[in-house]
Amino acid sequence: QVQLVESGGGLVQAGGSLRLSCAPSGRTFSSAPVAWFRQALGKEREFVATSSTSGGRTYHADSVKGRFTISRDNAKIAVYLQMNSLKPEDTAVYYCAARASGAGVYTRASSYDYWGQGTQVTVSS
């Protein structure tokens, strides 16, 4: 069983930056696709970004394209989400997710087998 632990969330002013990190305990996820999702208060969980197993393919939601960047370090077994030019509407709990296997990019939450507990990101105006 893989447990994912996110870190790096916090309070930031609009226009600022944060870098989220996700690391697994237990089985490594270096051989499977990973993703970030977010859920704002009172809203459904939404896709943010995904990376293929090698990191060679990434895909970002339109709402964050050009501002957020997903990356992974398979040597360190970690996944990152660099968030720049943050907006108040980016306020949410951000979740790291990983598949048990696979090689492509996946945008549906139902495609992922393992989830972290989430880290709060709050952007003030």
Image (cartoon, grey):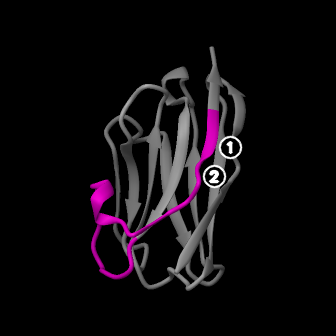
For disc 2, the marked residue is 20
- Tell me the element at label 2: strand
* Kind of residue sitting beneath label 2: Leu
Residue found 52% across the figure and 81% down from its top: 1
Please say whether residue 9 is visible from this viewpoint: yes
Residue 51 in percent (x, y) is at 40, 66
Residue 119 in percent (x, y) is at 63, 46
Left or right relative to 114: residue 5: right
Query: Based on the displayed image, in which of its 4 quarters is residue 120 positioned?
Result: top right
For disc 1, the marked residue is 9
Q: Pick whichever of labels 2 and 1 is earlier in the sequence.
A: 1
Residue 2 in percent (x, y) is at 54, 77
When the figure is inspected, residue 41 is found, relative to residue 38, above or below; the finding is: above
Query: Based on the displayed image, in which of its 4 quarters is residue 65 positioned?
Result: top left
Structural crowding at the residue carrying mark 1, measured as other residues with C-alpha within 10 Å and reported as few (<14), some (14–19) or many (≥20): some
When the figure is inspected, residue 29 is found, relative to residue 48, above or below; the finding is: below
Structural crowding at the residue carrying mark 2, measured as other residues with C-alpha within 10 Å and reported as few (<14), some (14–19) or many (≥20): many
When the figure is inspected, residue 100 is found, relative to residue 108, above or below; the finding is: below
Residue found 70% across the figure and 29% down from its top: 12
Magenta residues span 99-121
Residue found 70% across the figure and 49% down from its top: 8
Q: Assess whether mark 1 and mark 2 are in contact (beta carbons under 8 angstroms).
A: yes
- Residue 120 included in the magenta stretch of the image: yes
* Kind of residue sitting beneath label 1: Gly
